[in-house]
Image: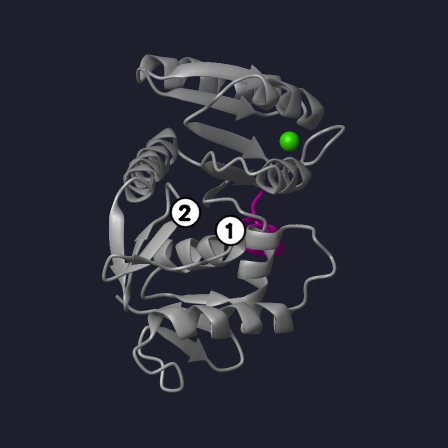
Amino acid sequence: MQKILIVEDEPSMRLGLKDNLEFEGYEVLIAEDGQAALDVIASNTFDLILLDVMLPKVSGFDVCKKIRKEGNTTPIILLTAKGEEIDKVLGLELGADDYVTKPFSLRELLARIKAVLRRGESLQKSSDTIVNIGRLSVNFGSYNASEENDSVQMSHKEFEVLQYLWNKKNSTVSRDELLTNVWGQEIHITTRTIDNFILKLRQKIEIDPNHPKIILTVHGIGYKLID
Ligand code: CA
């Protein structure tokens, strides 16, 4: 049974969602503020977290930021209030997977939940299988990379940058997005550092690193991995 955490301070909303999701066959836990959410996340594993943004004690953003920084990759759907466009962008940059704007219909929310859970399952699979990226065969699960059966040295961070781009292949990933999702709050990292990582990855992946065909530069924004 898939397990969902609902973090919502409004009692009627919290209980309504709980009843409906249980009816749909999910196992549901609830938390009524950000601190309670962090506590329950620390001692449980979830398939999905529904996270209200405006919460007492610790905001939804801070919950999101904190658990991502700790390496927790549980899918998160943010529940944002109407008109808070900035919240959506910020939320996705902080590592949320999707957002639903209040007021939402149950049908819409269930569709988003199913989509995010499906995506989570396929990511899980991708971390156990070997993928071919340029000259390399890469196993993200075991942090192994090889070129024609010869092992290639790559740092954990290089793997993480590459995996992030791979999971978002064929779409543009901004430097800020990489910074937030791979490095989190390590403040000594600048976008320049990211560019250096990309240069190193290209040396290992591209047939001609000076004319990259796999990790492309999207000028003024970031990078795109082509598959
Ligand atoms: Ca709220």
Query: In this orientation, does residue 188 appear?
Result: yes
- Judged left or right of residue 96, residue 213 is left
Q: Secondary structure at mark 2?
A: loop
Asked if disc 1 is less than 8 Å from ligand 1, the answer is no
Q: Point out the stretch of residues depicted in magenta.
A: 81-93
Which amino acid, mark 2? Tyr
For the residues labelled 1 and 2, the Cα–Cα distance comes to: 7 Å
Percent position of residue 75, x then y: 45, 36
Quadrant of the drawing holding the C terminus: bottom left
Nearer-the-camera pick, 29 or 197 = 197
Q: Secondary structure at mark 1?
A: helix
Q: Earlier in the sequence, mark 1 or mark 2?
A: 2
Which numbered dot is residue 156?
1
- Report the image quarter containing ligand 1: top right
Query: In this orientation, does residue 103 appear?
Result: no
Is 175 part of what is drawn in magenta?
no
Residue occupying the far right of the picture: 57
Secondary structure character of the magenta stretch overall:
helix
Residue found 43% across the figure and 55% down from its top: 164
Which amino acid, mark 1? His
Residue found 31% across the figure and 39% down from its top: 115
- Colour pattern of the rendering: one colour
Nearer-the-camera pick, 204 or 45 = 204
Is 91 part of what is drawn in magenta?
yes
Percent position of residue 208, x then y: 33, 83
Percent position of residue 27, x then y: 40, 14
Instruction: Kindly indicate whether the residue at mark 2 contacts the one at mark 1 (C-beta within 8 angstroms).
Output: yes
Which numbered dot is residue 143?
2
Indicate the quadrant where residue 24 lies: top left
The crowding category of the residue bearing disc 2, from other C-alpha atoms within 10 Å (few below 14, some 14 to 19, many at least 20), is some
Residue found 41% across the figure and 73% down from its top: 202
